[in-house]
Amino acid sequence: MKNLYLSVVLLLLLGPVVVRAQEERSLGPVSRTYAITNATIIQGPGRKIDQATLVVTDGLISAVGKNVAIPPAATIIKGDSLYIYAGFIDGLSHTGVIKPKEENNRERVKDPGNPSPERAGITPQADVRYSLNPEERTIEELRGLGFTAANVVPYGGMLPGNSAIILLGAEKKADPLVLVSKAALYSELTGAERVYPATVIAVLAKWRELYRQASLAKGYETTYASNRSGLEHPESSRILEAFYPIIDKRQPVLFKAEKFLDAQRVLALQADLGFPLILGDVKEGWDAIAKIKSAGAKVFLSLDLPEEKKDDKKDDKGKKDDKAKTEEKAKADDKPKTSTPEEIAALEKRKAEFVALYEGQPAAFQKAGVVFGFSALSVKTKDIPANLRRMIKAGLTEDQALAALTTSPAQLLGLSDRLGSVDPGKMANLVISDKPYFNEKAKVRYVFVDGVPYKQDVTDKPKGDAGAKVLLEGTWTAIIDTPQGKNESKVTFKKDATGFTGSVSGNMIPQVIDLKSVTLDGTSLKYTYTIQIDAQTVTVEVNATVEGDTYKGTATAGNFGSFPVDAKRNPNR
């Protein structure tokens, strides 16, 4: 994709076209050079340059600062009033990972004390790369918030397998997403269902057993390799061999440890066996800070927070509205009937104190001098910006929050030479917002992943209504807003007995191409079209919301990025 032509990019966004040999038109090479001018660049926590220019060349940051020379081939993005940060790094999640189907009717194991490794949740040899779906929606959702890389793990039980650090771009294949394979061996204190190890204690015992078996097996292999004469050859075991990099301290174990007791148990296991440790998705770790620091364990704190206590909703006359009264009555019905007002007040106070501990956890780790990043494993993506602001309100400074999203996870994951700051030579993973990122009204305008820009649709989209009546038939004029400028195309929709069909063409392109997979669900419109260039198929996918005689959404053209689409119905429909 990186070697396609600039004219192809422009024509894709104007409308599809088939390039014929007899045209013999000259196509210039794509410029993978971008210059963002007159922006506020936050190179890292505490490092800001006002009215500066950033140049991206072939996926790397090539220049940052004032009075920077702009290459002639650069696509210029005017950065007036924009703020540029290093792309955020998620330390632990299932982003882009296919979740296996749950087996509701599992056959009963004949010997529950000795099940197969797969049934026991023991697959440390597994690799998350084989479970990646590059079109999984969580990639786009997390990228839309400014995350450009993530340490992703497979689903499973006690030992699901190896994690990988992936780039959150819009690739069609999984391999191009992978930045680092086998970044860590992922583990949970999750017992198997109705077989050994079914309890947390059993999981810890099994962990010790496997680790020590692997140590013995590795030692025997070393002895056998030095002198094979007279020795029985070692048996191959993919499960035990998966522990070899852990034993050699070449790979860390990434343990999910949400609660204090989880962290305490994992720290005790690590102290016993001595493997390099990362604690992930920590939610209640404030009481374990001293032990974590003493153990030298790396930490990714959960971005998930308990729900905030909302103020009573009142109408204009100061009275609670009917909905608030209903909610209050339901809560009252749930409380023990014997509770006194004093007991209820004490309970609410304890809940508020607990929420405050959650919100203040990052500040507590910061105060103790423990470097940490953030994990998106259990948080709803839409809650992340608000939760970050709650943490800042609870004592974390904006610079410290930025560090936990950029420089700290880069350090913890061994990526500091490539990611985490806006410096020449680093990968062009960037998030660009129209206000300082932690401002409640800030919106992400662009995200760069490996030098590829993704322009974000910042309009407030109405949610699709499955029962809405929408008239789609007719011809529409669609404007696609790209870094190269606004491009116009004509889109026509027709309806028959089986559904919708359509076509698209650009005002500068005489050829017409049929649309594929046109669907209208309530007000949610989707359609695609493809173009064939030098035996390579590029698919443009449009997702939009129809409202009256307009539809708005995004057009995604492979790894060229996503761009806003704004269409209006032609009057002579």
Image (spheres, helix red, strand yellow):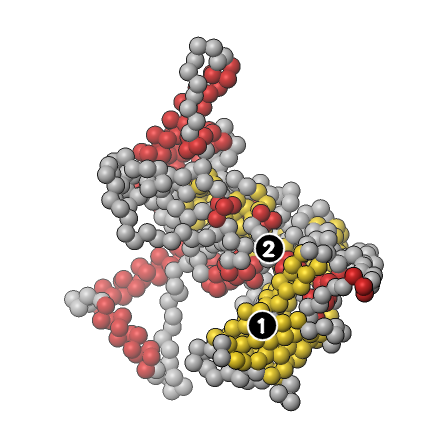
Q: Amino acid at mark 1?
A: Gly
Q: Closer to the camera, 337 or 422?
A: 422
Residue, disc 2: 171
* Coordinates of residue 151 in the picture (x, y in percent): 52, 47
Q: Which residue shows up at 25% across the image and 41% down it?
A: 109
Residue occupied by mark 1: 553
Relative image position of residue 91 (x, y in whole percent): 51, 48
Q: Position of residue 517 (x, y in %)?
A: 54, 69
| Quadrant location, the C terminus | bottom right
Asked whether, in this view, residue 443 is left or right of residue 123, the answer is right
Q: Amino acid at mark 2?
A: Glu
Q: Image quadrant of residue 322?
A: bottom left
Quadrant placement of the N terminus: bottom right
> Is residue 118 in sight in this rendering?
yes
Crowding at dot 2, Cα within 10 Å, few <14 / some 14-19 / many 20+, comes out as some
Q: Position of residue 100 (x, y in %)?
A: 40, 51
| Vertical placement of residue 474 versus 19, above or below | below
Q: Nearer the viewer, residue 214 or 173?
A: 173
Dot 2: element: loop
Tell me if 217 is positioned left or right of 167 in this view.
left
Q: Secondary structure at mark 1?
A: strand
Mark 1 or mark 2, which is nearer the start of the sequence?
Answer: 2
Residue 342 in sight in this render:
no
| Mark closer to the observer (2, 1) | 2
